[in-house]
Image (tube, grey):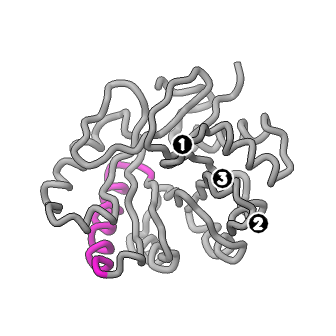
Amino acid sequence: MKTPLVDIHTHTAKTADDLIQIVNLGLGQDVPEQGLYSYGVHPWALDNADFQLEEAFEVLEERLQSPNVLALGEAGLDKMHKESYEQQIAVFEIQIDLSETLQKPMILHDVKSHNEILALRKKHKAKQPWILHGFDGTEQDIRQLTGQGLYFSVGESLMHSERKIAKSLKSIPLELLFLETDMAEIGIESVYDAAVKLLDLDINTLRAQIFTTFAALWNIGKTEPAC
């Protein structure tokens, strides 16, 4: 059997024998009995006038108890939403503590916030892995973030030669790399194909490495989890 493809962050559930995906659930959604999921308070949620922090965290903590919820996310910081940035930091810190208490890795939304994210990881002495989803940074960004307990997840940007990540992908250590579809209307196969071209790698080598990293993060050994 082929090593499964891993889609570490998507909003669209798909079914295939050789696919493992972590599907992001929105606030208020129930956790299905089948599949693997992430659940968190996205920084954009704070822009909603109806957002209730206490209620959101009651639901979040309850949902994170499910064994099907592998990760807390999306959580994080977005400087493009400056008016809520201080509140974003406070909400992110609560989620850092939840991640540590429940031993759930985090999937992060990070827009122009590398420095703040690194500072908060250090402040909270966080040990859980954090995965920077939709990463589109430079070689300098990668050097700054490598060795900090962070992983990089890359998606559709790889298909566009003008994007920063298309030029810097080789700078990411393979053992820290994930691939994703996020909200793109493409299959994860297309992202893998773009990655192997940029990395000049055999597809089976990349599949094996990403699955090995996935298995290590969630302590599942070398076999595919039930999904």
Q: Quadrant of residue 147?
A: bottom right
**Where is residue 43, by image quadrant?**
bottom left
87 magenta-colored: yes
In this image, 49 relative to 186: left or right?
left
Q: Residue at x 37, y 33 (%)?
A: 68
Along the line of sight, which residue is nearer the eye, 24 or 177?
24
Kind of residue at disc 1: Glu
Density class for disc 3 (Cα within 10 Å; few <14, some 14-19, many ≥20) is: many
Q: Amino acid at mark 3?
A: Leu
On the image, the x and y values in percent for residue 204 come to 78, 34
What's the distance in space between the residues labelled 3 and 2, CA to CA?
15 Å
Which badge, 3 or 2, comes first in the chain's sequence?
Answer: 2
* Rendered location of residue 225, percent (x, y): 51, 27
State the mark number for residue 177: 3
Name the secondary structure under disc 1. loop
Crowd around label 1: few <14 · some 14–19 · many ≥20 (10 Å): few
> Residue at (74%, 49%) from the top-left corner?
195
Give the spatial CA distance, label 1 vs label 3.
21 Å
Tag shown at residue 63: none
The residue to which callout 1 is attached is: 185
Quarter of the image containing the N terminus? Answer: top right
Residue type at numbered disc 2: Lys
The residue wearing badge 2 is 167
Q: Which residues are magenta?
A: 83-105
Residue appearing at x 38%, y 70% in the figure = 124
Q: Residue at x 79, y 38 (%)?
A: 203
